[in-house]
Amino acid sequence: MPNRNPEMLRGTVELLILTALSGGPRHGFAIARWLEATSDDELQLEEGSLYPALHRMERRGWLEAEWGISETRRQVKPYRLTSRGRARLRSETEGWTAFAAAVGKVLLAAQVA
């Protein structure tokens, strides 16, 4: 199923990646699959969005990664959160939660009116 609104997804890519990594290291493909599975296929990160975001977040010091071999004997680069990444996740989660609550209030007010 395609994303219902790709524009909304663009503004949350970093938060979604940080959240996906909060449970432990994952390589890019595993991050994308986790997001799809967790969202019942509503959220799909394409390679063209995922990998540039991972590299950008690594440059910012939010993630660390090393090349390794997967259980299927493929070369993978698992990413993991740094302490800066965990702090960013907390901050972004607080901001997104407040924003979503405000949007929810507006939507509810429109239904009552």
Image (spheres, helix red, strand yellow):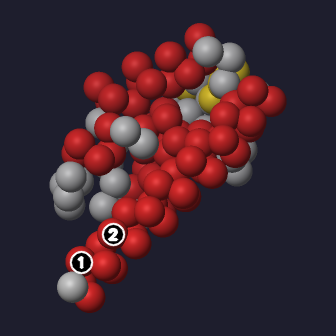
Residue 96 horizontal/vertical position (percent): 51, 51
Q: Quadrant of the C terminus?
A: bottom left
Q: Secondary structure at mark 2?
A: helix
Q: Which mark is residue 106?
A: 2
Q: Could you say which is closer to the camera, residue 49 or residue 103?
A: 103
Q: Is residue 90 left or right of residue 7?
A: right
Q: Residue at x 37, y 39 (%)?
A: 11
Q: Residue at x 66, y 41 (%)?
A: 91
The answer to whether residue 81 is visible is: no
| Mark 1, other Cα within 10 Å: few <14 / some 14–19 / many ≥20 | few
* 3D distance between C-alphas at marks 2 and 1: 6 Å
- Amino acid at pointer 1: Ala
Q: Could you say which is closer to the camera, residue 19 or residue 32?
A: 19
Q: Residue at x 54, y 57 (%)?
A: 98
Residue 88 horizontal/vertical position (percent): 67, 34
Asked if the residues shown at circle 2 and circle 1 are in contact, with their CB atoms under 8 angstroms apart, the answer is yes
Q: Quadrant of the N terminus?
A: bottom left
Residue 64 horizontal/vertical position (percent): 69, 21
| Mark 2, other Cα within 10 Å: few <14 / some 14–19 / many ≥20 | few
In this rendering, is residue 19 above or below 38? above
In this rendering, is residue 71 above or below 50? below
Outermost right residue:
83
In this rendering, is residue 33 above or below 40? above
- Amino acid at pointer 2: Val
Q: Which mark is residue 110?
A: 1
